[in-house]
Amino acid sequence: MEILVYDQFDAASDKAFDFFVQALATGPKTFGLATGSTPEALYQRLVESDLDFSQSVSVNLDEYYGLSSDHPKSYHYFMNQHLFQHKPFKHSYLPDGDQTDSDYEIKRYNQVLADNPIDLQILGIGSNGHIGFNEPGAPFDGLTQLVDLTPSTIEANKRFFDRVEDVPTQAYSMGIASIMSAKKIILMAYGEKKADAIYGLVEGPVTPDLPASILQRHPDVTLLLDKAAAAKLHL
């Protein structure tokens, strides 16, 4: 595991951008993408660049259950606003939050992931150590699932909604096994609220109680952190 710590998170976003440049240098790739505030600066750099994703594929980690793709709080909408409308991919896949037949949607998205092996996966991390929406206790061998979000995740995400009551309580999420199948993983984190999770990821035991700890077993992971997120590490 490579751990890179920066004074400012902007520099971490610059480094993440460099990984995209390197990945595309040898031809089209499949990129695993994340939503939320952490990758926004990275996506802005991609938008402003001359990188061409027209022959590449993207697959997203997750989507809120119950939100249509055109809902302004959906992850479809986020990705369109921050990346896809400016930098279209050949194909962009996300779970369908409007699909109420969860068995169907889980099977469909697992097939998408099987057909599009991920070359480079971008991750954030929750303060409770979740990756994607794989909350504490999620099985390490899990594939796509309909997840019940924990109170801490709902609380963390309420800043994106008018009221906490508006935050969805479930989401479709790529499973941990699917994340671990990516050839290269980049996890980005900033701020003191992520310090405990980062400590557990790097120096704690590998346990479902902190899902991100499984990354210790991946052969090619890079952490891009600011000093606050890395504050509890013994580097």
Image: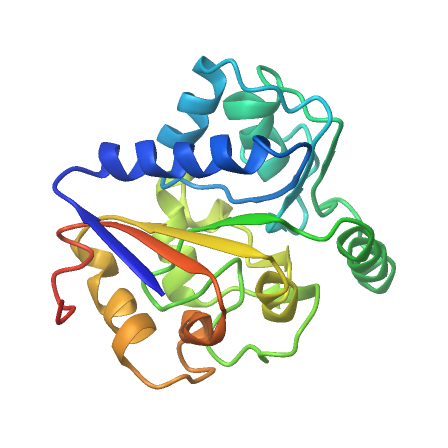
Residue 25 coordinates in the image, percent (x, y): 57, 30
Residue occupying the point 36% across, 41% down: 38
- Residue beneath the point at 54% across and 19% down: 51
Taking the spot 36% from the left edge, 29% from the top edge, the residue there is 41
* 232 with respect to 62 (left or right): left
Q: Is residue 139 left or right of residue 152?
A: right
Nearest the viewer among 163 and 25 is 25
> Which of 140/26 is in front?
26
Task: Give the left or right position of residue 224, taking residue 101 as reference.
Answer: left
Query: Horizontal and vertical percent for residue 42?
Result: 40, 31
Q: Quadrant of residue 209?
A: bottom left
Q: Report the front residue among 112 and 3.
A: 3
Could you tell me which quadrant the C terminus lies in? bottom left
**Residue 154 seen in the figure:** yes
Q: Position of residue 17 (x, y in %)?
A: 41, 32
Give the left or right position of residue 83, taking residue 189 as reference: right
Q: Residue at x 49, y 70 (%)?
A: 218
**Residue 84: where, in percent of width, then height?**
61, 23
Q: Is residue 72 visible?
A: no
The answer to whether 102 is drawn above or below residue 98 in the figure is below
| Quadrant location, the N terminus | bottom left
Residue 48, placed above or below residue 146: above
Quadrant of residue 92 within the rendered picture = top right
User: Is 200 placed above or below 20 here?
Assistant: below
Instruction: Tell me the quarter of the picture where residue 110 sits.
Output: bottom right
How many numbered discs sit on the rendered protein?
0
